[in-house]
């Protein structure tokens, strides 16, 4: 009997659900506008493990090797260009990248399911909170990873919109029921190489700290915890190492799930929403 080989392509929500049932896994939603650096971060994580373990954390295996290879290839090509160039993630369903990691001290294996989609879809959610229900990676996230584009923060004009964008996105996720599982939040300042090379770096770091504080203040009651990180996933400057800051982020992603919050009474939630929350109760096409 022929046994189908795994395709190695990024997983759909339904396929990611199977991983969640079979292994100790964390769902990481990568949230941010187009160009923030979400796909570059996925590529960087995979690339770093190709060079060897990160401290005590080693790479064990992946069900999505083929897609990770393609993503890395695209990211390397993009970062070699003098002019910024983006392989925009096409609009459509979320793609889950799977990495099973091992803590060499304990032997404990933990799978990461990194959910990546086109940034424009998060923007659309801010305009129409109904669409939050379709952001399966957010609804099931253990860690919401909110990317704050360092390149926009060092721009005298664009910086004013960054804080508003983050608040509007989180407000929409909250209003659309996307924070009901009280995810932990990683606030990630991206493109650290550009920030560090900028004459206004002190202001940019201050802006970033203020945005993180605002998230804590405004949405903290619906979030597990808020932590900040600074990364350079695809630096264009040689004075900043590729992947700086990413190891701490991975360690945060892998942390054990927070104790489950008291379940919200079913009667208070629309059936559709409850189906997404109850483990093993998710529909197969649009699962998690
Ligand atoms: N200088 C610098 N550029 C970066 C860094 N990380 C990403 N970029 C660049 O930022 C641009 C956007 O990166 P992507 O990872 O494609 O952004 P995205 O968030 O996936 O965007 P969408 O798919 O459109 O939602 C690309 O040109 C990257 O090369 C970084 O650490 N430093
Ligand atoms: Mg992308």
Image (cartoon, helix red, strand yellow):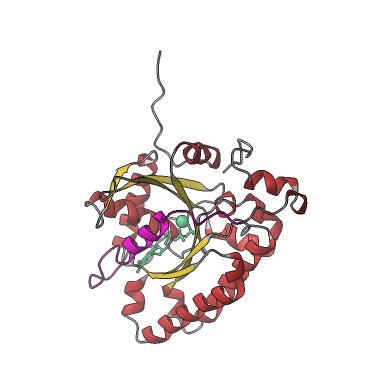
Q: Residue at left 63%, top 44%?
A: 278
In the displayed structure image, the side of residue 4 where residue 175 appears, left or right: right
In the displayed structure image, the side of residue 11 where residue 177 appears, left or right: right
The spot of residue 188 in percent (x, y) is 43, 68
Res 197 quadrant in image: bottom left
The spot of residue 109 in percent (x, y) is 35, 44
Residue 190 visible somewhere in the drawing? no
Res 232 quadrant in image: bottom left
In the displayed structure image, the side of residue 205 where residue 167 appears, left or right: right
Q: Main secondary structure of the magenta part?
A: loop
The spot of residue 101 in percent (x, y) is 33, 47
The residue sitting at the top extreme is 1
Magenta-colored stretch includes residue 245: yes
The spot of residue 125 in percent (x, y) is 64, 60
Q: Residue at left 45%, top 70%?
A: 149
**Residue range of the region highlighted in magenta in the rendering:** 235-261
Is residue 198 shown above or below 275? below
Choose between 214 and 259: the one closer to the eye. Answer: 259
Is residue 206 shown above or below 10? below
Choose between 252 and 83: the one closer to the eye. Answer: 252
Choose between 180 and 166: the one closer to the eye. Answer: 180
Q: Residue at left 55%, top 74%?
A: 216
Residue 208 visible somewhere in the drawing? yes
In the displayed structure image, the side of residue 287 where residue 147 appears, left or right: left
Quadrant in the picture for the C terminus: top right
Magenta-colored stretch includes residue 68: no
């Amino acid at each position: 009997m022929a046994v189908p080989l795994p395709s190695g392509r990024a997983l759909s929500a339904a396929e990611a659900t199977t991983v969640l049932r079979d292994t100790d896994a964390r769902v990481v939603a990568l949230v941010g506008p187009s160009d923030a650096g979400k796909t570059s971060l996925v590529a960087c994580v995979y690339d770093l493990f190709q060079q060897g373990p990160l401290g005590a954390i080693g790479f064990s295996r992946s069900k999505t090797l083929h897609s990770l290879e393609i993503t890395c290839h695209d990211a390397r090509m993009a970062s070699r260009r003098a002019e910024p160039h983006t392989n925009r993630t096409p609009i459509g369903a979320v793609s889950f990248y799977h990495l099973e990691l091992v803590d060499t001290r304990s032997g404990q294996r933990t799978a990461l399911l990194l959910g990546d989609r086109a940034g424009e879809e998060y923007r659309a959610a801010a305009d129409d909170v109904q669409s939050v229900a379709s952001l399966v990676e957010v609804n099931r996230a253990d860690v919401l990873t909110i990317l704050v584009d360092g390149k926009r923060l060092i721009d005298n004009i664009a910086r004013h919109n960054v804080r508003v964008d983050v608040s509007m996105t989180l407000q929409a996720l909250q209003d659309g029921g996307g924070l009901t599982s009280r995810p932990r939040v990683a606030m990630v300042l991206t493109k650290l190489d550009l920030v560090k090379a900028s004459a206004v770096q002190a202001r940019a770091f201050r802006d970033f700290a203020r945005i993180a504080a605002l998230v804590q203040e405004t949405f903290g009651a619906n979030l597990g915890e808020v932590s900040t990180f600074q990364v350079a996933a695809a630096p264009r400057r040689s004075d900043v190492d590729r992947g700086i800051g990413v190891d701490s982020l991975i360690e945060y992603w892998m942390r054990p799930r927070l104790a489950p919050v008291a379940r919200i009474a079913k009667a208070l939630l629309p059936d559709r929403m409850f189906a997404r929350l109850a483990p093993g109760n998710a529909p197969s096409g649009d699962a998690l």
